[in-house]
Amino acid sequence: MFLDRDGTLIHDVGYLRRVADVSFFPWTVDAIRALGRAGLRVIVVTNQSAVARGLLSEAGLDEIHRHMSSILEAGGARIDAYYYCPHHPDGSVEPYRRLCDCRKPGRGMIDRAVQAFGLDPAGSFVVGDKWLDIALARAVGARGILVRSGYGRSEEAEPRPGLVADQVADNLAGAASWILQRLDRQSTIEHRRPVVHPQSS
Ligand SMILES: [Mg+2]
Ligand SMILES: [Zn+2]
């Protein structure tokens, strides 16, 4: 389960730089908790060119993600890992100013997560509010779900030739329901972990 961050889990405020600007959608905690209870790994994949642009440090980005996790964990929900691309070819900060394999729709972040967690990309889902999230799903052979939160509605109004989402949902809650129904129907359940991970306290 690969989730875009801005516009999918939290409001897209442009370059998010401060913990105080993190604002979850009202359905996010419940949706992530449901996905976790179904045994899915929940992994964030997010382009954060703010780092390459000198607007935010990696430490600042980590702080934002720790803050997100603390709110989620208070609601019994959990993100297993955050993968971000700090790069941009037009960035101003030297080590980050480059072409890379991880900026979505590049597949580098998913490749790393697949290796770290032993996942099967073909049995995975990518959820996001932009076509590049769907293109990422296509690139790795996962299912792609476009959500209408964030930029989703305007993206939906501007289809990309040759790029079709497996599902379009109003938001992450709708995407999670669709995924969980599909998993229930599957006769082979090898992609589901039978053990519910314990919540850290
Ligand atoms: Mg987004
Ligand atoms: Zn990158």
Image: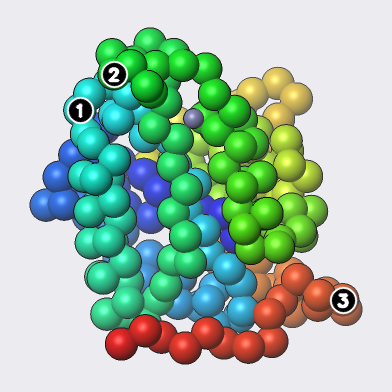
On the image, numbered disc 2 is attached to which residue?
Answer: 93
CB of mark 2 near ligand 2 (< 8 Å) = no
Q: Position of residue 132 (x, y in %)?
A: 56, 31
Residue type beneath disc 2: Val
Q: Are marks 1 and 2 in contact (CB under 8 Å)?
A: no
Q: Secondary structure at mark 1?
A: loop
Give left or right: position of 18 versus 88: left
Residues under labels 1 and 3: Cα distance?
46 Å
Q: Position of residue 190 (x, y in %)?
A: 81, 75
- Rendered residue at 68%/54% (across/down): 115
CB of mark 1 near ligand 2 (< 8 Å) = no
Q: Residue furthest left?
A: 20
Q: Secondary structure at mark 2?
A: loop
**Could you tell which of marks 2 and 3 lies nearer the N-terminus?**
2
Q: Residue furthest front?
A: 95
Give left or right: position of 188 versus 54: right
Residue type beneath disc 3: Thr
Label 2 packing within 10 angstroms: few (<14), some (14-19), many (20+): some
Residues under labels 2 and 3: Cα distance?
47 Å
Mark 1 or mark 3: which is in front?
Answer: 1
> In this orientation, which residue lies closer to the viewer: 48 or 185?
48
Q: State the quadrant of the N terminus.
A: bottom right
Q: State the quadrant of the C terminus.
A: bottom left
Q: Secondary structure at mark 3?
A: loop
Mark 2 or mark 3: which is in front?
Answer: 2
User: Residue 135, located in which quarter of the rendered image?
Assistant: top right
- Rendered residue at 71%/63% (across/down): 118
> Looking at the rendered structure, which numbered label has been put on residue 55?
1
On the image, numbered disc 3 is attached to which residue?
Answer: 188
